[in-house]
Image: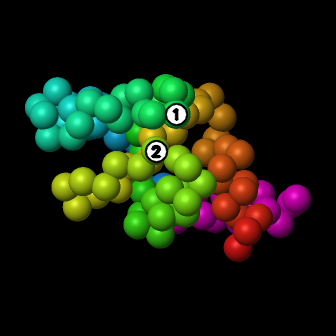
Amino acid sequence: MYETQERAKQITDIHVLWGQSTVIEELIQAGKIDEEYIYPFNGDEVLEWWLVTPWLAERLKEQGEVIIDELGCRWWGRQSSGQAIYMDGVIQEICGEN
């Protein structure tokens, strides 16, 4: 458990780059990104948008997370909030697999 948590901290430090919620909202309003990402098909609401590396985006996508791959960037639609990202279940799952 401790090893997974430490790995999760390392992965988020390296692969979660910037909070981008305002950027995504502006891109959607400008018509550069499809509005469907606000309420993804699984019915869960995206609470935060984060710019992530291609490596993490691929693993999050494999876990069924919302990923926007547009304009040369990859954004993760985080469906939780209020805790450190490394504590998210999906991040713990990714770290436990590697």
Q: Main secondary structure of the magenta part?
A: helix
The answer to whether mark 1 and mark 2 are in CB contact below 8 A is: yes
Residue 48 visible to an observer of this rendering = no
- What's the residue at 52%, 34% (across, down)? 42
Q: How is the image coloured?
A: rainbow
Label 1 sits on a secondary structure element that is loop
The percent coordinates of residue 64 (x first, y second) are 55, 49
Q: Considering only vertical position in the picture, is 62 above or below 86?
A: below
Q: Please state which of residues 9 and 34 is positioned toward the viewer in this rendering.
A: 34
The percent coordinates of residue 29 (x first, y second) are 17, 27
The percent coordinates of residue 86 (x first, y second) are 66, 50
Residue picked out by circle 2: 66
Residue 75 relative to residue 82: left or right: left
Toward which corner of the image does residue 71 lie, by quadrant? bottom left
The percent coordinates of residue 10 (x first, y second) are 63, 64
Residue picked out by circle 1: 42
Amino acid residing under circle 2: Val
Residue 85 relative to residue 2: left or right: left
Question: Is residue 29 in the magenta section?
Answer: no
- What's the residue at 51%, 27% (across, down)? 43
Residue 19 visible to an observer of this rendering = yes
- What's the residue at 62%, 28% (across, down)? 82
Label 2 sits on a secondary structure element that is strand
Res. 21 mark: none
Q: Considering only vertical position in the picture, is 27 above or below 11?
A: above
First to last magenta residue range: 1-14
Amino acid residing under circle 1: Asn
**Of callouts 1 and 2, the N-terminal one:** 1
Question: Is residue 10 in the magenta section?
Answer: yes
Q: Residue furthest right?
A: 1
Q: Quadrant of the C terminus?
A: bottom right
Toward which corner of the image does residue 30 lie, by quadrant? top left
